[in-house]
Image (cartoon, rainbow, N blue to C red):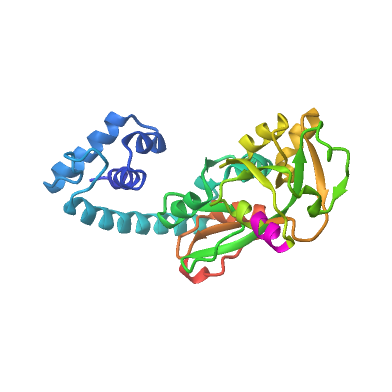
Amino acid sequence: MHIENFKIFIDLVEKKSFSKAAKLNKITQSAVSQQIKVLEKHYNITVIDRSHKNFSMTSEGEKLFESAREIINKYEKMSAEILALKDVVCGTIHISTIYSIGLHELPPYIKNFLRDYPTVNVKVEYRRSNLVYDDILGKSADLGIVAFPIKLKQLEILPFREDKLSLVCSPEHRLANKKEIDIKEIKDQKFISFDKDIPTRKAIDLIFKEKKISVETVMEFDNVETIKRAVEINAGVSIIPEITASQEVNLGVLKTVKIKGKKFKRPLAIIYLKGRHLTPAMHKFIGMLMGKPFVRPDKSLN
């Protein structure tokens, strides 16, 4: 029995998908199925309940999963400790993050990191905010990068940076020629918003409530790219991280307007699971994001 068998099995269970497990391990779905059959034959058990339409494990499969994850954790710890002794920076870093950060914040950092450490493979997955936390808690990602971080006892949270939140509108909109506005000036405007469960939406709604401002929410979307497309056609205005609209502003299809007040900032943070064994590559990557050498708060657990 090889460590790869356990790794693929864990990926399959966590992703609940043969195709996703195959993609993650750069093999075919058929190869994933064969690996599972090898496990079942070796232990003379059935791990996947194939009578269910949706992905489901047998009780034997659940027990094997728990044990396999312990084995993989110990293997990763051993590998990380050996690499740390040699000060070798290599391997793969799995990052889970929201669209706006992954598309607009991370690229220059990743470019610089890969220039300095070409033997490291950085994989970025774009997710809704709640799924980023699921990825970290479920150990399917090494690091998460989120906005308006939620404190959870299982997580370490490291401040990353702050974004400016600005009004964004079509060049044809009456507010487009202003350099700065008071938030009250968008009262009763048609508003393009994030979905209600998105942290940036919650923060903006709280400001509206405090300022007693009402807007007409005409559209709601789960990512900033779709919001920008709606604003481009002058369907309404929105409040988004200023950096995410820089390309459209340069092209002349959108205008950003600063909003008076200190509250219009979006804190970003790096999150990882307490007790997770961070490789030298992960330490270096976090250090690059933070702009200083990184020493984890729970150092004794590494």
Residue 246 visible in the snapshot? yes
Can you give x and y, in whole percent of width and height, for residue 142 in the image? 48, 52
237 or 198: which is nearer to us? Answer: 237
246 or 170: which is nearer to us?
A: 170
Residue 206 painted magenta: yes
Residue 47 included in the magenta stretch of the image: no
Q: Which residues are magenta?
A: 204-210
Q: Quadrant of residue 208?
A: bottom right
Where is residue 79 shown, x and y percent of the image?
42, 54
**Which residue lies at the image location 32% right of the left edge and 48% below the top edge?**
10
Q: Along the horizontal axis of the image, is 62 left or right of 203?
A: left
Q: Position of residue 153 (x, y in %)?
A: 48, 69
Is 115 situated above or below 139? above
Q: Residue at x 85, y 50 (%)?
A: 181
Residue shown at 53%/64% (left/top)? 156
Q: Main secondary structure of the magenta part?
A: helix
